[in-house]
Amino acid sequence: MVSSPMTYKHASARYRQWYAKLLRFYPKAYHERFAEGMQQTFNDLCCERYQAGDRLFGFVLWTFADTIVGIIKETIEKENIMMNTILKKHGATIIWIITGIATAGTALLVKGSEYENAWLWVFSIGIVLAGFTEAYLKIKDQNK
Amino acid sequence: MATKNQIQPLTPAVFHILLALSKEEKHGYGIMKQVEKDSQGKVSMGAGTLYGSLKRMLDSGLVKESDKKVDPTMDDERRIYYQITGAGRKALEAELERYKRIVTVAQERKLFPNTYAV
């Protein structure tokens, strides 16, 4: 509980510091774009409560909880976008490599003659190489 | 079934932000206060919800940022103001129209308090 205006100001300053630290958990791009505005809004709300003589603790707790939910949402969204970009750009390559590894795995499990297994190995190495070739060509294209 | 040309229903947060910006541009704190006023204190948004919604609205072109300026009624800090766009106004109108239709249906079915069918 905050008893005097001085204590109130100290508490408010401390909460503002903590809030600034909490905002750093947002993804970088989001932080650069909105952290200043969010900090200003938080300061304004603290001042409003100070002028109204309301307690800060409940408000701070609610704001922090709301911000943490926001951080989680933005982080998930950023990860989803990253994942989609990776899949869009390198989806085919990933499929090639996974197929190659799966075929190699099958070659290890199949108990056939050495001749049959050799073909499976050649096939799986071929698929993995195709995957790496595609990845190389894409990276070369991007660097042009 | 919704077609591509139809404007999708807005989330409550987006609806209230657009309503708050319908008259004039506002900064974050100004939007919060206007939302509280418009909803008679029933809706209060935290900074996380407000700025998360603003980000999505900026990305979808419902609002735009205007230059940083000082709010004459507050301190001397420069703030980013947000403005409703043409697309934002259309989305707000479509949502209000949707609400109007729902209210009409409710009136027809006598669903409002003191108008229940006996």
Image (tube, rainbow, N blue to C red):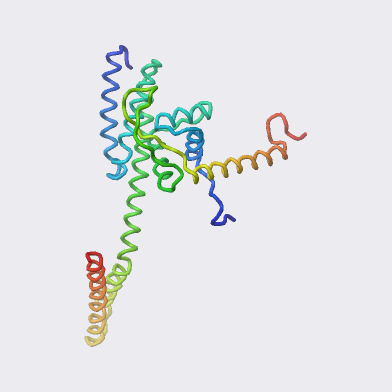
Q: Quadrant of residue A140?
A: bottom left
Answer with left or right where residue B29 lies relative to residue B9.
left
Residue depicted at x 39% and y 18%: A54
Residue B91, position in %: x, y?
A: 53, 45
Residue depicted at x 38% and y 20%: A49
Examine the rendered structure and indicate whether residue A116 appears above or below residue B96. below
Examine the rendered structure and indicate whether residue A89 appears above or below residue A15. below
The residue closer to the viewer here, A136 or A33, is A33
Q: Quadrant of residue B4?
A: bottom right
The extreme right residue here reads B118
Residue A139, position in %: x, y?
A: 23, 66
Residue depicted at x 53% and y 26%: B40
Q: Quadrant of residue A112?
A: bottom left
Residue A98, position in %: x, y?
A: 29, 69
The residue closer to the viewer here, A4 or A117, is A4
The residue closer to the viewer here, B70 or B105, is B70
Residue A126, position in %: x, y?
A: 24, 79
Q: Quadrant of the N terminus of chain B?
A: bottom right
Answer with left or right where residue B92 lies relative to residue A7.
right
The extreme top residue here reads A4
Residue depicted at x 27% and y 23%: A13
Q: How many marks?
A: 0
Q: Quadrant of the C terminus of chain B?
A: top right
Examine the rendered structure and indicate whether residue B76 appears above or below residue A64. above
The residue closer to the viewer here, A113 or B97, is B97
